[in-house]
Amino acid sequence: MPKGRLARRHSTAVVLFHHAVAERLGLGPTDHKCLDLLRERGPMAGSDLGAITGLTSGAITGVVARLEQAGYVRREPDPHDGRKQILHLALELAHIQDVIGPLRKDVAALLENFDTHQLTAIAEFLARTTDLIYRHAALLRAETNSDVGRTRATKRTPSSRPPSAGSKMRVKR
């Protein structure tokens, strides 16, 4: 299988797994991944969560309200800025661990088949690709935001731009 296809297949499997986890937890996929970011990075303001995800302040407000209502997060006043609230995990995440535990167990068993050098290479690959993916997500968001500004100015949607000179797109006449 070509490497690009394998990476795409892996990425799709991960996304679909996390959708299934979100469903099991009674969350939407975006809410689940925002909860994951709080688990990974620790307490933060909603605006910080929005900056990381690219979600609007209105979308983040909805995510936080749903996570709070489900009992996963709590808000506390920011001790340095009374206008902000800091999001904290509200409970032990044992339920989440119960949901993802079987996969973790299977992955741990799989990793036993690799020697120390192979595990080091796998860890380095995962760390580097994670950094690349975050960087490219930020670049795509920046380009999209730039396109949105141009679209408003020209009243065009990005998909209604004329094809470039080298494009093979056919235009109906």
Image (cartoon, rainbow, N blue to C red):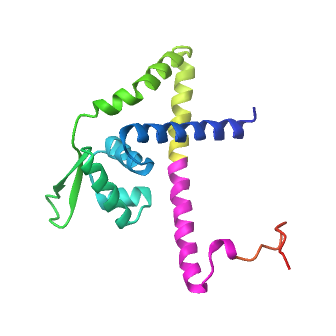
State the residue in front, 55 or 4.
55
Residue at horizontal 58 percent and vertical 73 percent from the top: 147
For the image, the number of numbered tags is 0
Residue at horizontal 35 percent and vertical 66 percent from the top: 58
Q: Residue 58 vs residue 148: left or right?
A: left
Residue at horizontal 77 percent and vertical 73 percent from the top: 163
Question: In the rendering, at what x and y percent does residue 72 appear?
Answer: 27, 44
Q: Residue 31 vs residue 154: left or right?
A: left
Question: In the rendering, at what x and y percent does residue 102 appear?
Answer: 43, 22
Magenta segment's dominant SS is: helix
Residue 149, magenta (yes or no): yes
Give the answer, above or below, for where 43 lies relative to 108: below
Give the answer, above or below, for where 3 lies relative to 85: above
Magenta region: 133-160
Which quadrant of the view contains residue 46? bottom left
Question: In the rendering, at what x and y percent does residue 4 appear?
Answer: 70, 40
Quarter of the picture containing the N terminus is top right
Residue 147, magenta (yes or no): yes
Quarter of the picture containing the C terminus is bottom right
State the residue in front, 105 or 127.
105
Question: In the rendering, at what x and y percent does residue 115 appear?
Answer: 55, 15
Which quadrant of the view contains residue 16? top right
Residue at horizontal 62 percent and vertical 76 percent from the top: 157
Give the answer, above or below, for where 152 lies relative to 72: below
